Image: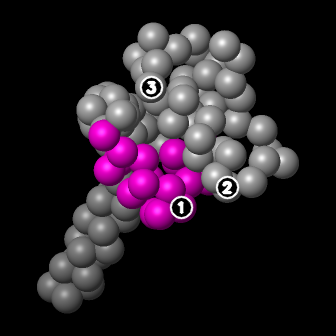
């Protein structure tokens, strides 16, 4: 079964493809898993995610995907948090230094 999330498809067709891929998660080839993750992270609307998460056929697979892949911090997220907190500490330290 060759299921791909094609860019020219309608929203309903793309959601149906994502649902079909999700039904086979975690036993997906890496390219299909990447397509599924890209769809959830970049393309799916809140309605799409809600419809899939409430579907009895794939709700447990969605919960597994969400726990294993979607809710994880990626390296760019960690780097951004470290830079943000470093900048905040530098600003607060600078204010404390200038105030003394």
Q: Nearer the viewer, residue 70 or 58?
A: 58
> Which quadrant of the rendered structure holds the C terminus?
bottom left
The dot on residue 90 is none
Mark whose residue sits in front, 3 or 1: 3
Q: Is residue 82 visible?
A: no
Sequence-first disc among 3 and 2:
2
Are there few (<14), some (14-19), or many (20+) residues within 10 Å of tag 3? Answer: some
Estimate the spatial distance between the alpha carbons at disc 3 and disc 2, rounded to whole Å. 18 Å
The answer to if 1 sits in the magenta stretch is no
- Magenta segment, principal secondary structure? helix
What residue occupies the far right of the structure in this picture? 8
The dot on residue 11 is 2
Q: Is residue 45 above or below residue 29?
A: below
The dot on residue 45 is 1
Pointer 3 residue: 23
Residue 85, x across and y down, in percent: 30, 59
- SS class, disc 2: helix
């Amino acid at each position: 079964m060759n299921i791909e999330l094609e860019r020219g498809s309608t929203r309903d067709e793309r959601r149906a493809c994502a649902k079909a891929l999700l039904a086979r998660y975690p036993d997906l080839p890496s390219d299909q898993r990447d397509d599924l993750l890209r769809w959830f992270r970049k393309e799916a609307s809140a309605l799409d995610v809600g419809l899939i998460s409430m579907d009895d056929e794939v709700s447990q697979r969605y919960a597994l995907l969400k726990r294993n892949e979607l809710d994880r911090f990626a390296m760019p997220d960690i780097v951004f948090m470290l830079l943000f907190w470093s900048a905040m500490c530098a600003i607060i330290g600078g204010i404390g230094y200038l105030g003394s």
